[in-house]
Image: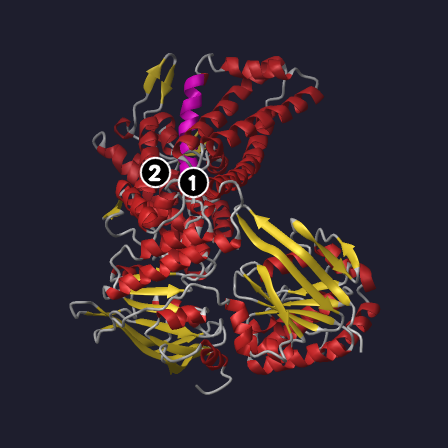
Amino acid sequence: MTEPQPVVELRGITKRFPGVVANSDVNLTVRAGEVHAVCGENGAGKSTLMKILYGMQQPDEGTISVNGEQVRLRNPQDAIKAGIGMVHQHFMLADNFTVRENVVLGAESLHGIGSAARARITALAEQTGLNASQDALMESLGVADRQRVEIIKVLYRGARIVILDEPTAVLVPQEVDALFATVRSMQEQGFTFIFISHKLDEVRAIADTVTVLRRGTTVGTADPKKISSRELAEMMVGSELPSPETRESTVTDRDMLRVNGLRLSAADSGRAILDDISFTVRAGEVLGIAGVEGNGQTELVETIMGMRKASAGRIELVETGGTVHDLTKLGTLARREVGIGYIPEDRTRYGLLLTQPLWANRILGYQTRKPVSRGQLLDIAGARRDTERIVSDYDVRTPGIEVPAAALSGGNQQKLVVGRELSGNPVLLIASHPTRGVDVGAQALIWEQIRIARREGLAVLLISADLDELIGLSDTIRVMLRGRLVSEADPATVTPQELGSAMTGAEAA
Amino acid sequence: MTSWRTKVLPPLLAIVFSLLICSIALLISGSDPLQAYWTMLRQLGQGTTAVDTVNLATVYYLSGLAVAIGFQMNLFNIGVEGQYRFAAVWAAIIGGALHLPPVLHVVVIIIVAVAAGVLYAAIPAVLKVTRGVSEVISTIMLNSIVGGIVAFLINPDQFGVLTGNNLRTQVIDPSGRIPGIPIGDASLFGFVFIAAAIGLAYWFMLNRTRFGFELRASGESTTAAAAGGVNSKRMTLIAMLLSGGVAGMVALPELLGRDYTYAITSTQGYGFTGIAVALLGRNHPGGIALGALLWAFLDKSAVSLEQVHVPKEIATIMQGAIVLSVVVAYEVVRRADLAAAQRRVGRALSGGRPASVAEGGAI
């Protein structure tokens, strides 16, 4: 049997944004009728690549070929003409319209709005397994059916190649199975799918081929049936990283953070995002939380920081003197004031004021404390001085402290955030993906700083998708799956492979 | 590093652009643009125009500040219009009814005006914070309601008096007036200094206090502010109330310095002008002052255009063109500037090459 023709071929795609390269020499070959997964951590360049393929952004270098012909995709309309459609992660549907109106909206010229359109949608509904009537209002549909409507929208416009952007993020496991069944049956009818995901078990379940992106470039293409999740995970996080190993244990028996029976319910459905979470972090201890992204880690951190309101449970912080602070009812600022430092997972959205100079960013989160504030007044001179200190101690590469935070590269932004969060004499540091998207040098520096602070008795709650980082830095590892802490691992003995299987729930660890 | 270019270039570009547009309009209508502009400029030196301009600018300045406070927090307080009229009518009623010693009388009137402004702004503020109602919608509706409230309050059955054909409130005693500064035939409002002090206080609040920092942080990024411990609901509430408080003073320069009474015929629309002035001044207290002066100048010198048989509406065209182009110009210059800063940092650190992802670039 000969190899099917490539339907999409991306060659040497490079995309630069001011001061940064998002995609660098990316190659992707998708063959007709296959499900091709594109894998990579957040920030690896998946979304930029897909935006290029869907015509939302133009590559600076490289070529795109569809069905053997080189094309220029200047906008999504060009992509649709070339037969490429995209199902966005966040649905773009009008709730107060019917299924049919949603599908036809914007594509009235194809089959009109009357019986021709109805017939076409009926055919497509059968192909995709949509059960709802096409006259049903969109608001009456469940998430899985909404996703099918999104797929129908794309097919209605004539796409033969469908990009699914993290389609399972919004689905429960049964719905994921149904979606995969739909994808498989459509694959038999000759459709091609590009499946964006960072959930390895799903990739292995559905994909015929997988291409892994890391730090903006293609690492390789593999057959997911032939390689294991652990090999795939290794491709994603890489193994040439400096070792984060901590040498001697500094764990004390003094409890610092106690979380007990924490529960967080989703605002709309009451479904538990976090369920019965209990753990303790002691002074001098790094507690690592492992887990595939989207299993509640972000929510856990935000609940401990007071940015989300827990539905049940108790959070306590024990000061060095033995005073117990009940954090459960406190706001974010009060929690920071009792000594929590917070390195958020998305520094540009949660950690920095991008248009403000570096010294103003030093104040954020510390606006009530010395040296950047005196009561109700800001101490700007103090903020500047302390920013200078962070810039030199943490090796933030910048021409000065007056540049806006947006002008720094990711690694230097992150060093600034880490420096700030370790400056307030914290007793507990919550570090969410502290080295994501930073260069190797910054990574080593951040690890070293966390280690030094730990030696001085800091308690650290570390969330990371980088298993080497987790194993290397943590004194204890807990695994999080579907909003629960399911198992525990000893970083001294566990391998990334074992951790990887525990994270996917593949085996009871 | 917000360079001078980001601050000065956009308004200059906007003014030049709007002069061009108006020139085209003037040429089409068969007039000489240069003659028209010269007439407007010359008018500034004639009679009381210069002082009138500053007096009117004081009103616009207060209104611009009120809008700018909201803008800092990404709140669009269109309701300055309603808030100032609500405040003005109460200040005039209570000021006219009381008989107090000098200074104290003035202070009481100012307090009443601010309190009334805060009160009227509290409605959209509470609706926004508790029910998520867009302040744009609620303030527009409240603007419309205020006309009825004013008419009701200055009806002779309530607090008003009928003089000739005009309904107005009781005249405020001389003790409740702010004396003007005579310049030539004209008199400069004493309130100019109070307005300047409020401008200073606004600058200080924004740049030197914790509250101002939290306000700006929430305006720039709700998520980062929340992670930094800023309670966005509280900030929304306070910003809206502050905005209403300043809005409450908009009518006071005229009320305490010239009219001493609030009538059904008193000028309306200052609140809307404030939106334009705040946009023009980029929410900066100095910029708003310049914007207010420019706007007042265009208003006051437009009358002179009749002498050269040019319709005075050309000044309105100019005002509209300035606002539209200043918004566009600010955005263009801001983007160009950020890209330039990133390139500068990149060049300074990597010897000319753009940083690659592997060197720590974010995506």
- Residue extending furthest bottom? A508
Quarter of the figure with residue A401: top left
Residue B68 shows which numbered tag? 1
Residue underneath mark 2: B202
Q: Residue at x 27, y 40 (%)?
A: A381
Does B200 lie within the magenta span? no
Instruction: Kindly check if marks 2 and 1 are in contact, taking CB atoms under 8 A apart as contact.
Output: yes
Q: Is residue A229 above or below residue A348?
A: below
Residue in the image at 78% along x and 75% along y: A122
Q: Callout 1, which amino acid?
A: Ala
Which chain does tag 1 point to? B
Q: Position of residue B111 (x, y in %)?
A: 29, 40
| Span highlighted in magenta in the image | B50-65
What is the secondary structure assignment of the residue under circle 1? helix
Q: Main secondary structure of the magenta part?
A: helix
Residue type pointed to by label 2: Tyr
Q: Is residue B211 visible?
A: no
